[in-house]
């Protein structure tokens, strides 16, 4: 599927917002969450630029699955480090081990149950934290209500993960083309939610 000019504009917007979040949006935090968020949003920036330059064909590369795991792991680690101090080291350990497990299982075999299970567990845990924790903090009054937008961004990110997994199942071409059509929109809206949530929350 050929990428349209509008798709490229949307991806460029995503990249610019991710770059803004790295440079401005997290500058008042301590070093560890800054590092975690920088990694997460940095990979988001890189992904949008690769799509912008190389088009949708880059999604067929198996390394996309591995790289895409870094985004939720980075953002969820930053959230845990900011708001759940007792779980900092355990979750950081999970994030590192989980990413290495995804790399290892995907390197050994790209098909079969084990790579899928490992990927689902790692993405599932990280995605659930990004979705639930900001909404919970906003509902409890510990953060401004707008912080719930981070959780919405996490939900949309989960949809992107399902999208990437769906592409790897060998769906017929028309279905894959339809999903590719919506990906730039989904990426932009996700990034808007993250940036707005962190800025206003």
Image (cartoon, rainbow, N blue to C red):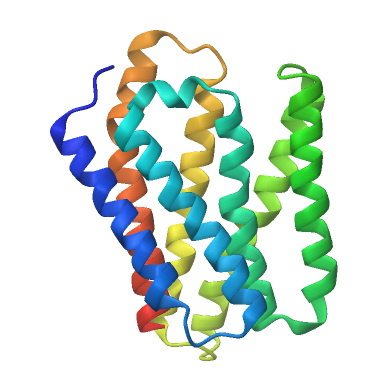
- Identity of the residue furthest to the top in this view: 172
Left or right of 125, for residue 97: right
Question: What's the residue at 39%, 18% (across, down)?
Answer: 176
Q: Please state, as top left, top right, bottom left or bottom right, where the N terminus lies in the image.
A: top left
- Identity of the residue furthest to the left in this view: 5
- Identity of the residue furthest to the bottom in this view: 141
Question: What's the residue at 61%, 85% (across, down)?
Answer: 30
Q: Residue 80: x and y, percent?
A: 68, 73
Q: Where, by quadrant of the figure, is residue 195 drawn? A: bottom left
Picture layout, residue 79 above or below residue 126: below
Q: Where, by quadrant of the figure, is residue 121 drawn? A: top right
Q: Residue 186: x and y, percent?
A: 34, 45
Q: Residue 15: x and y, percent?
A: 33, 53
Picture layout, residue 162 above or below residue 43: above
Picture layout, residue 187 above or below residue 196: above
Question: What's the residue at 83%, 51% (across, down)?
Answer: 97
Question: What's the residue at 38%, 60% (across, down)?
Answer: 18
Q: How many marks?
A: 0
Q: Please state, as top left, top right, bottom left or bottom right, where the C terminus lies in the image.
A: bottom left
Q: Where, by quadrant of the figure, is residue 36 drawn? A: bottom right
Q: Residue 74: x and y, percent?
A: 62, 60
Left or right of 69, for residue 170: left
């Amino acid at each position: 599927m050929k990428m349209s000019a509008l798709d490229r504009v949307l991806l460029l917007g995503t990249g610019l917002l991710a770059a803004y979040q790295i440079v401005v949006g997290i500058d008042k935090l301590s070093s560890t969450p800054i590092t975690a968020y920088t990694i997460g949003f940095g990979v988001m920036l890189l992904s949008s630029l690769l799509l912008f330059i190389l088009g949708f064909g880059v999604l067929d590369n198996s390394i996309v699955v591995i790289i895409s795991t870094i985004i939720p792991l980075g953002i969820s680690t930053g959230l845990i480090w900011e708001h759940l101090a007792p779980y900092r080291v355990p979750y950081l350990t999970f994030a590192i081990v989980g990413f290495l497990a995804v790399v290892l299982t995907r390197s050994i075999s790209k098909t079969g149950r084990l790579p899928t299970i490992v990927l689902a567990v790692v993405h599932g845990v990280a995605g659930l934290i990004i979705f639930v924790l900001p909404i919970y903090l906003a509902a409890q009054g510990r953060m401004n209500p707008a912080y719930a937008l981070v959780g919405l961004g996490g939900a949309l990110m989960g949809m992107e993960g399902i999208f990437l997994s769906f592409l790897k199942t060998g769906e017929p071409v028309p279905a894959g083309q339809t999903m590719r059509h919506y990906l730039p929109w989904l990426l932009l809206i996700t990034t808007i939610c993250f940036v707005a949530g962190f800025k206003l929350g």
